[in-house]
Image (tube, rainbow, N blue to C red):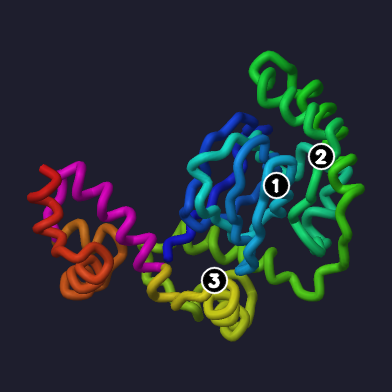
Amino acid sequence: MNINYYRCDYDIRSKYCDSFTETAHAHEGVEIIYLLEGSYHTFINGEEYTATAGDLFVIFPDNVHYHKNSSNIKAVLNIFPTRMVPEFHGVFTKKTVKSPLIKDANLQSVELLENLAKNKDKYSYETKRGLLLAAVSMILERMTFSDKKEPINENLGAILKYCDENYKEDITIESVAKKLMLSNSCVSHIFTNKLQMNFRDYINSLRLKYTLQLLKEDKLTITEIAYESGFSTIRTFNRAFKKKFGISPLQYKKKKL
């Protein structure tokens, strides 16, 4: 499984959607989804939730999530960094929520979210922040929280960021742990239990994603692509590529060109 990690280098991303990605991902920002029509399944930190029309999801920063069977829906989506609502920064970073799913969401908050989706390009930052703050305030009133027992999600976000920035290097569990001042067992635990995948497989998935880009550009040889992507040997690259895609890098290159 490949898990994408996204940074919030914008104030708010607000839009209507008729489907969601099924690729597992996490991001720095808060994601709020209100379902207008249809139904679908969302998996958040390994837990499955089913949403129907009128329901609302609040997905906290650094929570790994993905969606299933969402091709026939209509929803309003808002993603924003916690810096946009500093009044609730502590809630989003230091609390854990009993359930991210709110059944039959407050209509006033929904109207505010739809207003943002329709007019975000017209509004000033201050207006968008005001509307968002009001909506978030009403939404959080419907949720139950508890203190985080351990900074698992905070560590998860830091680990995913570091891997995303350094997968081309000779990266190991030990090097990640040392850089982030975590124990080896903490990093290993997050991959095994939180992400349910092997650390090496995850790093290879990032490398292989990058190799596809290089193969399509057709500027480097297969060997150069292997080393540029972080693989230590061409043999390791070929084996990982064939395991993932069912054909060799050379066959893939010929097929795409």
Residue bearing mark 2: 85
Instruction: Label 1: state its secondary structure.
Output: strand
Mark 3, Cα crowd under 10 Å, few <14 / some 14-19 / many 20+, is some
Answer whether labels 2 and 1 touch (C-beta < 8 Å).
yes
- Residue visible at 79% across and 50% down? 102
Mark 1, Cα crowd under 10 Å, few <14 / some 14-19 / many 20+, is many
Instruction: Label 3: state its secondary structure.
Output: loop
Q: Is residue 168 above or below residue 180?
A: above
Q: CA distance from mark 2 to mark 1?
A: 10 Å
Quarter the N terminus occupies: bottom left
Q: Is residue 134 above or below residue 235?
A: above
- Residue visible at 62% across and 80% down? 186
Q: Is residue 93 left or right of residue 172?
A: right
In reply to whether residue 216 is colored magenta, the answer given is: yes
Q: Main secondary structure of the magenta part?
A: helix
Amino acid identity at mark 1: Val
Residue bearing mark 3: 195
Instruction: Label 2: state its secondary structure.
Output: loop
Amino acid identity at mark 2: Val
Labelled disc at residue 30: 1
Q: Is residue 51 above or below residue 151?
A: above
> Mark 1 vs mark 3: which is more N-terminal?
1
Stretch in magenta: 203-222
